[in-house]
Image: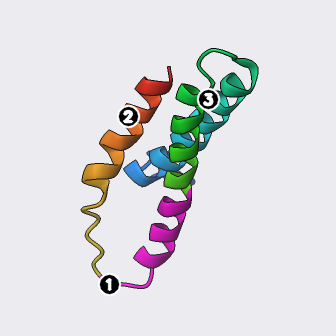
């Protein structure tokens, strides 16, 4: 038995909430300072910020049900990866 043991593993939802705003801020700043690829950097930034809002809303909903099955993650994670790759 470990006293004071803290579980430091992150769930997939926590990674989504962490990576989306970081990517959104990064691409937003790059779009602000870039003249050539402004639209191509702004679109993933907006999508990533919308994903954060959606994920926070789903997290609140998830606490109100007994057995939440998050099938939306099957589409959300590839969308996040595409936005991070498309903006880079």
Which one is nearer the viewer's eye here, 24 or 40? 40
The residue under the point 29% across, 60% down is 72
Q: Which mark is residue 66?
A: 1
For disc 2, the marked residue is 81
Which one is nearer the viewer's eye here, 68 or 39? 39
For disc 3, the marked residue is 27
The residue under the point 67% across, 26% down is 31
Q: How far apart are marks 3 and 1 (CA)?
A: 37 Å
- Figure quadrant of residue 30: top right
47 shown above or below 39: below
**Residue density around tag 2, few if under 14, some if 14–19, many if 20 or more, within 10 Å:** some
Closest to the camera, between mark 2 and mark 3, is: 3
Element class at badge 1: loop
Task: Using residue 37 as the reference point, say whether residue 47 is left or right of it.
Answer: left
Task: Using residue 40 as the reference point, say whether residue 32 is left or right of it.
Answer: right
66 shown above or below 69: below
Instruction: Please check the rendered image and state whether residue 11 is part of the magenta-colored stretch, yes or no.
Output: no
72 shown above or below 14: below
Residue numbers of the magenta segment: 53-66
- Figure quadrant of residue 58: bottom left
Horizontal and vertical percent position of residue 7 = 47, 50
Horizontal and vertical percent position of residue 27 = 61, 29
Q: Residue 34 carries which label?
A: none
Element class at badge 2: helix
The residue under the point 53% across, 50% down is 17
Instruction: Please check the rendered image and state whether residue 58 is part of the magenta-colored stretch, yes or no.
Output: yes
Could one spot residue 7 in this view of the protein? no
**C-beta proximity under 8 Å, tags 2 and 1:** no
**Residue density around tag 1, few if under 14, some if 14–19, many if 20 or more, within 10 Å:** few
């Amino acid at each position: 038995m470990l006293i004071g043991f803290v579980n430091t593993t992150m769930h997939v939802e926590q990674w989504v909430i962490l990576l989306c705003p970081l990517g959104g801020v990064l691409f937003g700043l790059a779009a602000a300072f870039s003249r050539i690829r402004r639209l191509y950097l702004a679109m993933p930034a907006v999508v990533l910020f919308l994903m954060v809002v959606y994920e926070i809303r789903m997290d609140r909903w998830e606490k109100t049900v007994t057995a939440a099955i998050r099938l939306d993650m099957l589409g959300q994670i590839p969308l996040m990866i595409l936005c991070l790759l498309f903006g880079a």
